Every structure is written in structure tokens, then in C-alpha cells.
Image (tube, rainbow, N blue to C red):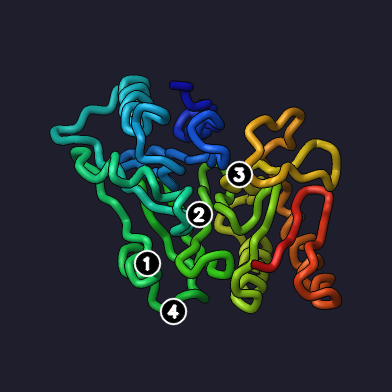
Amino acid sequence: MSEPEITWLSPDTAQIRQPKSSHWEAPFLFLLFGRERSLLIDTGATNDEAVFPLRATIDRLTDEWLRRNRAVFTRPYPLVVAHSHAHRDHIAGDPLLVRRPGTTLVGTTPAQVISFFGFHSWPDETVEFSLGRRIVDVIAGPGHEPSAVAFFDRATGILFTGDTVLPGHLYVRDRAQYRATIERLIRFRAAPTAPLVELRGAHVEMSATPGVVYPPGTLDQPDELPLPLSPRVLDRVLSALDASEDAPGKPVVRKRFVLVDE
């Protein structure tokens, strides 16, 4: 069993990468801690604790954060498990957490996402979700997948974009909805609730060599591009959408992503 790669992005924000040895997708998960509850974004690509110890990892990181902050709860510190979208490699670990004490699992259909976060005019509305002295803005993001959302963490300035924007393949299932999502994120960037510092998606599939993408199924990714992307990448994605109109079905290759019609 390979251990996941843990990176503390801030004292209250942990990035978890599923080991390549457990699944070639090697998705990134994010655990955000607040004074009242924590939020886990995605659960990874396997429900086999033997190859990716998801629950043990969440428990260990939570215990570490509680000790560091001298936080005491009379009942289990609450955890909300949500998803960037409902594709298998982002929800497969749900069964490992469904019986975890103090844990609430958000459903994966659009109706369940809308209901839990309290959207009234999906997908054109941004809603606030409080972790306790820490606000996360939840932005509807269909286009890659119908229930997709992006999470903006005001504390770190990170916009967590799942598979909607990442250094790799941007698979577009519904072109009209995907364009609307990118335009929605651009509008949010123009008037954010806090400074938007960077985007972090759920995979790295690009080499540090501009325009070179690793093929699906690749287990060894030497010299891969770092995960964070500049907020300006949203303009480049919109430009790639425009360029793809001239050659429908043909991938549009850019330095940090490849736009693909699914």
C-alpha cells in the first residue's frame, strides 16, 4: 500500500493526492477545516482502504488539526463530504465514510446538490457555505458533468475546480453549459468575495513541457506540471472554446490544458 501525498496548503487546508499505484487517475482531494465543521471535496477513485486508506487519512488529519488548535467537541467534530462532480473517480470512496461518526455525505445528483447547499436559481447562483469562521462559496459548474460545482475558499483564495479546469484534459460534455460555467467563473473572478489567488483542479495530466499531455492510463508522470493554475487560465479556456468552433470534435491544445469534446 502506498501512502497518499499530503500537502498542507495552509494551517487549515490539507491537499490529499491518491497514490498512482492505487489508481492511474491519482485524483486530488481537499480537506478544509473550520471552527464548526470540516469539508472534504471528493473521495477519490477507489473504495479499497487497502490501497488508498481514505478514512484513516481523514481521521489522522482531523486529529492533527484538532490537537494543533486545541479544539474540543462534546461529540464528533462534524465532517461534510461533498464532490466537485459525480464521476466515479471522485465519488468511489464514499462508502468508506458513510458510517463515519459525525459525517454528512452530500448526494451526487443535481437535485441533491441543489437541495443540500440551498441553491434557488441553479445554475446562475452562488451560495455561501459556512464551516464556522470560514466561508466557502459554492458555484454551479455543469458542462463537464451535470452536478458539477466549484468551491471558492475565501480563507486561502483558492478556487477548487474539479475536472472543469485543470492542467490536463478538459472534457466537455455539454458545450453550452460548459461555456456558461467558464463565463460564470470569469464573472466571479471579476468580483470575488475575497482575492482569488489560484485555481486547483482534481488531476494533473500535463507535462511541464508546454502542450505535452500524458495519455489516459499513464502511471509514470515525470516532470509533471504543478497543479495550481493562474486565474487568467479561465480566459484561455474561453478562447479555446471559441477556437474549437472552427474545428468541431478536434482537440484544442494549449500550454496547460487540452480541450476535448466528449
Q: Which residue is mark 1?
A: 109
Which quadrant is home to the N terminus?
A: top left
CA separation in Å, label 3 and label 2: 16 Å
The residue sitting at 37% across, 61% down in the picture is 108
| Residue 151 numbered mark, or none | 2
Q: Nearer the viewer, mark 1 or mark 2?
A: 1
| Residue 196 numbered mark, or none | none
139, above or below 92, in the image: below
Crowd around label 2: few <14 · some 14–19 · many ≥20 (10 Å):
many
> Residue 79, can we see it?
yes
Task: Give amino acid for label 2.
Answer: Phe
Label 3 vs 1, first from the N-terminus: 1
Crowd around label 3: few <14 · some 14–19 · many ≥20 (10 Å):
many
Q: Are marks 3 and 2 in contact (CB under 8 Å)?
A: no
Q: Which residue is mark 4?
A: 121
Q: Nearer the viewer, residue 132 or 147?
A: 147
